[in-house]
């Protein structure tokens, strides 16, 4: 369903809170403001889950009234338990509605849209309630927009809740570890299964960095979105930038699958958020298994390695545009699509591999990567990835990994 540019811009603006907000209350205040603007309603409430007491509670709601109740009661409780959206045009006509909250606050609830907010692994971590649509009832379009909003906000809220807890318990070293754990939890749990293709994704963060991320996004008609991103710099900041970038791209794919729109919209927000000199390289593609075609745009991710089984050659293609966040606008025009033939390989690899230096200060280099690919091209995608990692480890024996290692390999079978 199409949404306005203004709605989309506001929605994407939520993702910037990942890298800027330092506490949960401030984050919820931003969510409240954005939700009321995007959904054009009078009030909102975000009910967080307290697992210890099995209760939902609102630490921030429009009107600043604090509310706590059983996670099994009311419309919010039903949305939390079932994971379903509930749209009620007349709250007082629905027996599930609890008027006690209205009585305690002096507010009159009319229409009510209740949406579950999912965390990293799809579990419901909170509930968003939108109260009193201005000018009428909440529509099916509002439900769609609210779900998109909640899918992004749920991840943001869960991340901030985790960070707040750990910030109290530990200092910077543990915060770094938490950021790594969160980032790893966002990586795909398994490789996608696509007829006619063998696909493997793999990531190994360095001890003190976390700026790489990869993702597989399942789209309509069995197509597959492919993402590899690498934020500049080291430490907690780049890790959060990578998480932010992934969240934005996933949110954008819920409204459009046009690569140019996705990449340029993501760049606008990142450019506003990143400090001068910081950026993130991004490869974003869509694989259509029916045609064996890969459409892609590459914001600074290069080289893009492509092995042709027919010729035995490996092309090293350049990026199609600049890294994201560095300039206020980029040319997001996709490259010429790739039509894969049986035995062909597409290899997306981050610079942690070919920039790994041995004890003599010599880099592994892209030529060694190419040699490993050529020598192992007949093996499975997972085996080829393992061979690359094994070779770079042997090359760098006696040295420490100081940058993230990430690779996606697509093989036509």
Image (cartoon, grey):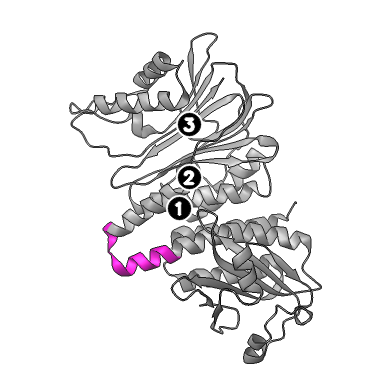
Q: Position of residue 145 (x, y in %)?
A: 69, 59
Query: Which-is-in-front pick, marks 2 and 3?
Result: 3
Tell me: 270 left or right of 255.
Answer: left
Query: Which-is-in-front pick, marks 1 and 3?
Result: 3
Q: Is residue 167 magenta?
A: yes
The region drawn magenta spans: 161-173
Residue identified by numbered label 1:
274
Tell me: 326 left or right of 108.
Answer: left
Q: Residue at (72%, 86%) from the top-left corner?
A: 108
Q: Is the residue under label 3 in contact with that under label 2 (CB below 8 Å)?
A: no
Task: Tell me which label, 1 or 2, sits earlier in the chain.
Answer: 1
Assign the C terminus to one quadrant of the image: top right
Element under disc 2: loop
Q: Is residue 310 above or below residue 141?
A: above
Q: Residue at (31%, 42%) from the top-left corner?
A: 206
Q: Is residue 81 above or below residue 300?
A: below
Helix, strand or loop: magenta stretch: helix
Q: Position of residue 173 (x, y in %)?
A: 27, 57
Element under disc 1: loop
The one of 2 and 51 positioned closer to us in this rendering: 51
Residue identified by numbered label 2:
326
Q: Position of residue 189 (x, y in %)?
A: 48, 43
Would you say residue 237 is visible in this rendering? Answer: no
Q: Position of residue 240 (x, y in %)?
A: 42, 53
Task: Tell me which label, 1 or 3, sits earlier in the chain.
Answer: 3
Label 3 crowding class (10 Å Cα cut-off): few <14, some 14-19, many 20+? many
Residue identified by numbered label 3:
200
Q: What is the CA distance from the residue labelled 1 to the residue labelled 2?
A: 8 Å
Q: Is the residue under label 2 in contact with that under label 1 (CB below 8 Å)?
A: yes
Q: Is residue 171 magenta?
A: yes
Would you say residue 409 is visible in this rendering? Answer: yes
Label 2 crowding class (10 Å Cα cut-off): few <14, some 14-19, many 20+? many
């Amino acid at each position: 369903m199409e949404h306005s540019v203004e709605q989309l811009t506001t929605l994407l603006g939520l993702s910037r809170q990942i890298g800027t907000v330092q506490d949960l209350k401030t984050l919820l205040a931003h969510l409240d403001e954005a939700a009321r603007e995007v959904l054009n309603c009078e009030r909102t409430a975000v009910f967080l889950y307290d697992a210890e007491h099995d209760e939902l509670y609102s630490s921030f709601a429009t009107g600043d009234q604090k509310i706590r109740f059983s996670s099994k009661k009311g419309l919010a409780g039903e949305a939390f338990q079932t994971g379903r959206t509930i749209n009620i045009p007349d709250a007082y006509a629905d027996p599930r509605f609890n008027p006690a909250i209205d009585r305690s606050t002096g507010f009159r609830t009319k229409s009510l849209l209740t949406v579950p907010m999912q965390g990293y692994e799809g579990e419901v971590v909170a509930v968003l309630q939108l109260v009193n649509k201005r000018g009428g009832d909440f529509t099916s379009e509002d439900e769609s927009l609210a779900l998109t909003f909640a899918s992004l906000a749920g991840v943001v809220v869960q991340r901030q809740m985790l960070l707040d807890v750990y910030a109290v318990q530990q200092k910077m070293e543990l915060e770094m570890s938490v950021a790594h754990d969160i980032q790893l939890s966002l990586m795909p749990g398994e490789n996608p299964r696509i007829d006619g293709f063998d696909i493997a994704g793999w990531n190994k963060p360095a001890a003190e960095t976390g700026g790489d991320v990869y993702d597989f996004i399942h789209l309509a008609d069995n197509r597959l979105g492919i993402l590899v991103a690498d934020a500049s710099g080291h430490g907690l900041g780049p890790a959060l930038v990578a998480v932010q970038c992934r969240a934005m791209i996933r949110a954008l794919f819920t409204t459009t699958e046009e690569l140019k729109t996705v990449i340029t919209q993501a760049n606008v927000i990142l450019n506003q958020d990143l400090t001068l000199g910081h950026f993130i390289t991004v490869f974003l593609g869509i694989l259509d298994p029916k045609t064996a075609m890969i459409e892609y745009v590459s914001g600074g991710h290069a080289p893009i390695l492509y092995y042709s089984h027919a010729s035995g050659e490996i092309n090293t293609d350049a990026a199609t545009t600049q890294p994201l966040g560095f300039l206020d606008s980029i040319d997001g025009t996709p490259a010429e699509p790739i039509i894969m033939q049986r035995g062909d390989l597409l290899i997306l690899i981050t610079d942690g591999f070919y920039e790994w230096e041995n004890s003599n200060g010599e880099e592994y280099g892209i030529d060694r990567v190419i040699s490993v690919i050529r020598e192992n091209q007949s093996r499975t995608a997972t085996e080829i990835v393992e061979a690359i990692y094994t070779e770079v480890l042997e090359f760098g024996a006696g040295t420490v990994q100081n940058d993230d290692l990430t690779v996606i390999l697509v093989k036509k079978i």
